[in-house]
Image (cartoon, grey):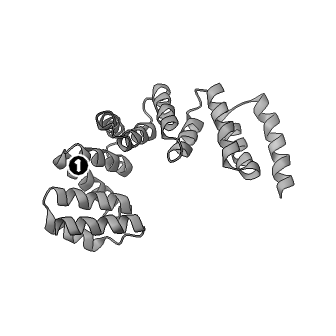
Amino acid sequence: MDGDFQAAYSNLTIAYQAQPTPSNAKLIFQALSSLHGKDKAISFLRKHIQEQPADVQNQLLYAGLLLTTNTDNAITTYQQMIELSPNSVIAHNNLAYLLMEKGQLKYAHKYALNALSLTSDNIMVLDTLGSIELKLGKKEKALERFKMAYSVSGGKLEEQTWLHYIESLLVKGQKELAKRRIGQFTPISKSVTEKLAQLQRDYF
């Protein structure tokens, strides 16, 4: 099997050298991941986007890989992507999330609002914006975002967004509705279970 991957990689390298297209770059990334692991594949991708800065598709892939490992580089990459592709919802939203995590709430809010202006009913965007507005003390706005996310999802939110929605209800003093939503919510991860228990201790 390794021989098959090596042969494929050799052929892909020839194709990439002739035409360093986004699709060829992504195929080489996948082959390198299989043959040599993610670190070597990421190094290739970094070099590729430096040489092909207009390749937004692989910039997205690269920045996504850096989200949890190198946030400073991810922030820089998303900023570059926004210059190249100002209508990229993912770039605006993920940049807003990373800036929020670094405590840069004013700038995070700006990019989250940009993302919302590009898509008014994206649950990930509503979650990011609502989370930032909770941290900024904009309680009413935050709750508005999470209620919209709940409506768009048909009441089937991802657990982190569920948690943020419940927190926004409690912060606004809507305890009865929060209780009903808690009754609909079955957390899976340990961290969300613990955070929910903490919210219940703090508000009930």
Q: Position of residue 99 (x, y in %)?
A: 38, 38
Quadrant of residue 12 in the image? Answer: top right
Percent position of residue 2, x then y: 83, 55
Q: Nearer the viewer, residue 152 or 57?
A: 57
Q: Determine whether the residue tagged by mark 1 lies in a helix, strand or loop.
A: helix
User: Dot 1, how many residues are within 10 Å of its Cα: few (below 14), some (14-19), or many (20+)?
Assistant: many
Establish if 162 lies above or below 41. below
Residue at 48% across, 34% down: 78
The total number of labels drawn is: 1
Quadrant for the C terminus in the image: bottom left
Q: Is residue 204 above or below residue 51?
A: below
Q: Is residue 52 visible?
A: no
Q: Which residue is located at x 20 percent, y 65 percent?
A: 202
Residue 6 percent across, percent down from the top left: 83, 48
In this rendering, position of residue 121 left or right of residue 98: left
User: Residue at label 1?
Assistant: 142
Asked if residue 27 lies left or right of residue 113, the reply is right
Q: Position of residue 32 (x, y in %)?
A: 73, 46
| Residue 28 falls left or right of residue 166 | right
Instruction: Write the residue at 87% across / 53% down.
Output: 3
- Residue type, numbered disc 1: Ala
For the N terminus, the quadrant is bottom right
Residue under the image location 50 percent in, 26 percent down: 84
Query: Residue 162, can we see it?
Result: yes
